Image: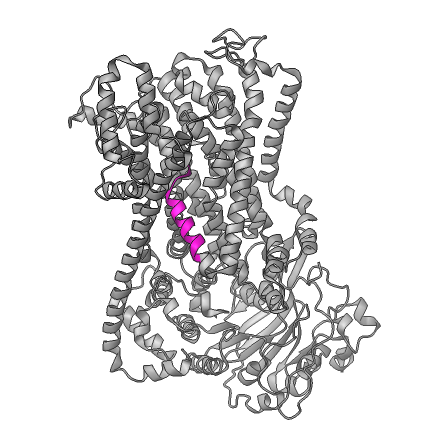
Amino acid sequence: MTDSVASPTQMNKAPSGGWDQFNEERIVPIKKYAVRNPSLIVGLVLLFGMLFLVGIGHLIWDTEMFRPLSTPTRLAPTAEHPFGTDTQGRDLLAIAILGTPLTLRIGLIAGVVAIGLGTVAAFLSAYYRGVIDGAIRSIVDVGLAMPALLILILVRINVGRELSTDEMGIAIGLTSWVFPARTIRSQVLVMREQAYVELSRLSGTSGMGIIFKEMMPNLIPYITASLVASVAGAILASIGLEAIGLGNLSDPTLGMTIYWNIQFSSITLGMWWWWVPPLVAIVIVFVSLFLISSGLDEWSNPRLRKRV
Amino acid sequence: MTEQSEVAENSSPSKLSSFTGTSLRILSGILGNFVVKRFLFFLFVVWIAATVIFIIPRLSGQDPVKEKLLLEAQRGGAMQTGLDEMAKTYQKRFGLDQPLWTQYTNYMIDLSKLNLGTSIAFFPRTVNDIVFESLMWTLGLMGTVTILAFILGTLAGAFLGWPRRPGWLQYVFMPLLTLSAIPQYLLAMILIFIIAFKLGWLPLFGGYSPSTLPNLSWDFVVDVLRHAILPAFAIIFSAIGFWAIGMRGMMINTQGEDYMIQADAKGLKGSRIFMRYAVRNALLPQVTGLALVLGTIVTGQVLVERVFSYPGIGDILFQAIRLSDFFVIRGIVIVIILGIAGATFLLDVLYPLLDPRIKVRNT
Amino acid sequence: MVQPTIEETRLSTEQAIKTYREGARITDADALVVEDLSVYYETDNGTVKACDDVTFTLKQGERFALVGESGSGKTTLAMALMRLTRPPGHIAKGSVTLNGRDITKLSDDEMRKTRLSELALVPQGAMNSLNPVMRIERQIVDGIIDHLDDDDPKPTKEELQETVRDLLTRVGLRPSVARLFPHELSGGMKQRVAMAIGISLRPKLIIADEPTSALDVVVQRQIMQTLGRLQEGLDASIMLVGHDMGLVAQFADTIGVMYAGKLVEIGPVEEVFSDPKHPYTKLLIGSLPSLQEKREFLGIPGLPPQLIFLPEGCAFEDRCPSRFEKCQAEIPDLFDLGGRREVACHLYEEEAKS
């Protein structure tokens, strides 16, 4: 630290900008910090633990059995099919191994698209103000009144064919950037007024320079937290879209498995092995993303730290 | 204003009465103007949304109506007679050979009369008919549940974000909040399995028992309530977590405000500081947040209805998707957007009652 | 970044001493006795001694000013006197005796009742210290209501309104301000409201934490005048926390200089300004601009130490022009030089003994 620790009340203030400082003040204490912020660690362990199991599954299991009619139908779990089979003769272990990363992939694509667009819009809007700000804010406000899922349904119905998982990810991302745009914008607005940004502006740094050298480093934790939240939201939307029958019928994603479950009333048939694994996988995905995101929130908002 | 001019005003008490009168008049002018502004914005949102809905099918270069009719024609037979009539009706109604601009104008005129068109699958029933019947179910369930979840969640969050709360609270609530990350429709499935299927305490699906006829008898009301419990719980449970987390964060932020320190320095009672200073201020972003997530609430509700086959808008939407009933889908999307924009408008207009600063800020 | 040691100094030293308050009614009774008060913050990297072994006495009717660079522990000390230190900070040791009672030993509820009724805080940055969603009258009244005992008669609405009107008039505001919200007031008006709240229960000690920061010069003067008038009306003592030496010199009877969490010099304002003892005080006063003699603004070379890595000896040692061997090895005690003058510097060890 180059700055003196002025007073305890000032210790939590944002660093005065720059990547070096970001490294010193944010990355170095990360180990110590992890102990204090268990939700981040638990979340990461859950998520990567699950991905690890999926990876092992890919190596030792015949995932081709995800196709319908590749096994006998309606088998309860046995040694041959540890997760059982469904009404259409799919091996449910193969589905779990293939579906989990596929669903995460949709979420990640959508999240990156949404946060990318949202961040650019937020900076354009908050930094340059004026006409650009007015236009972007109108788009965002209108967008907030139009639920992404409904727009996706309209698009999907009119496209008239099934979307691939990647296309679905991009489509969800394109329809869900307004919320992050709005929240990041307000963060930029606050930061814009801060003394170190003002100082940088007065000393003649260009707009782009200020955005990338001064603001970005301080917004990284917030944007990362938004990304994680966006990924969770996108997975929610994708599963919703699939559950309502607009997914790709040949893809073994978690959402499609839910769709087949609802379609064939597996619950009332007593076929618990059909719906429990995707449900558990989805719950783990959401809980881990939730923990990671609230852990990151704590990181980006130091006030949340010690007090409670 | 400098201190000196204040002193000058102080010394002329005759101005006092006229000051209040003028300020009242100005205030009502500002408020009226503000409401008009918000209403114009509401119309703007609806217009943009309607336009987007108009454009989407035309961008894809496909006509869902023709396709649907073609599909039906391929199945042949019984439908054949109705098909010609339907095709004619549609051609006439939408003037499909007319220029795009005329189509757009007609569509907007229909929309301004709240005429959503005619269903393909349930021809000749109108979309209005179908949508508004199911809307009652959705509004009844969602309205109650959203308000309940907002109140309970905000309260829980307020306590969680209060430094002087009992310590055990955190250990009870935090795991519950984590569970709220589970999507509502999955919770719905779990609830159906345990409470309805395994234990048989509550009905599995539907809005009321098929054996009863909708009427205003006590039995029917009880039946409807019994059917609503599980869907309501599925939504409330995860929504509470959402509101609690937001409120907790806001409460913690509020702790750092100067007026909180001053409230302590004034020697106020803990309960007063909690309600009148902390909660009262932390509530403001919560209400703004409510406007922001209305869309998500509706989406969640739509899916929960699907899981429970609850006869609301979500179930109709699913049926319409299955039958490729484009006009019903479009009608539902329009109605939902109208609802969200309308609710946002209401929140916007009521918000100044909560935050006295807003009147100034919006002029 | 090197901060200017004294921000916004607006009065020359000479002028300041001339305007020093005459005929102050300082009695011999102790209003506030602070002994060995220490406030520590526990952090991951160690203990931050934000305020360490602070000892001083405030007489009834006295105006005591606490000065020092930002981060020297002034506000920490003020908050500790109110017992409003927030975690991870805590009062590690020491006693605060107010009108004969040690308030560090009071129960939380007794302490709550003591605030405002016996010692009141006029906050720093009155800008945000009022609840933005509450009318001014409500914010004045709720302090009064929460200090009623169970057997006290409930004041009527009219009585409360009358009280509010009276308080607002006394701080120089028109009574109609009662019906306004904070955002409808200017900075100076808000500061006046904060003072009205502060005197609402006629406290014997007012802690004013930089009451004039962020106000313009004319308003600053008016606010300080009002504060002084109120104090005399209540026959109370004032502890003024500030960094504006000019204002302090005009207002206070006694001055205490803080450096790195320690009180390094105490004395009558006049004497400290004309004959500062501690090298830090010397530099501080020497760096004040003067009307007579235009010269370059001088800061104090070097930086204040980090409170978490305090040196073994005197905290000012590495910036001190008159340091010698002992300074590095030993923390100086506060030596009594007589005539209410105390200084924490090894240079004066002999003088104190004689």
Q: Residue A126: percent from the left, percent from the top?
A: 50, 57
Residue C69 visible somewhere in the drawing: yes
Query: Magenta segment, which residues?
Result: A134-148
In which image quadrant can residue B31 be found?
bottom left
Residue B130 visible somewhere in the drawing: no
Could you tell me which residue is drawn at 36 percent across and 33 percent down? Answer: B301
Is C230 a magenta residue?
Answer: no
Q: Residue C349: percent from the left, percent from the top?
A: 76, 77
Q: Is residue B143 above or below residue B195?
A: below
* The residue positioned farthest toward the top in the image shown: A72
- The main secondary structure of the magenta stretch is helix
Q: Residue C327: percent from the left, percent from the top?
A: 79, 71
Could you tell me which residue is drawn at 71 percent across and 58 percent down? Answer: A1
**Is residue B160 toward the left or the right of residue B302 in the image?**
right
What's the colour scheme? one colour
Observer-nearest of C220 and C1? C1
In which image quadrant can residue B327 be found?
top left
* The residue positioned farthest toward the bottom in the image shown: C292
Q: Is residue C53 above or below residue A143?
A: below
Observer-nearest of C258 and A163? A163
Could you tell me which residue is drawn at 46 percent across and 46 percent down? Answer: A178
Q: Residue C150: percent from the left, percent from the top?
A: 33, 59
Q: How many marks?
A: 0
Observer-nearest of B19 and B175? B19
**Is residue C97 toward the left or the right of residue C263 in the image?**
left
Is A138 a magenta residue?
Answer: yes
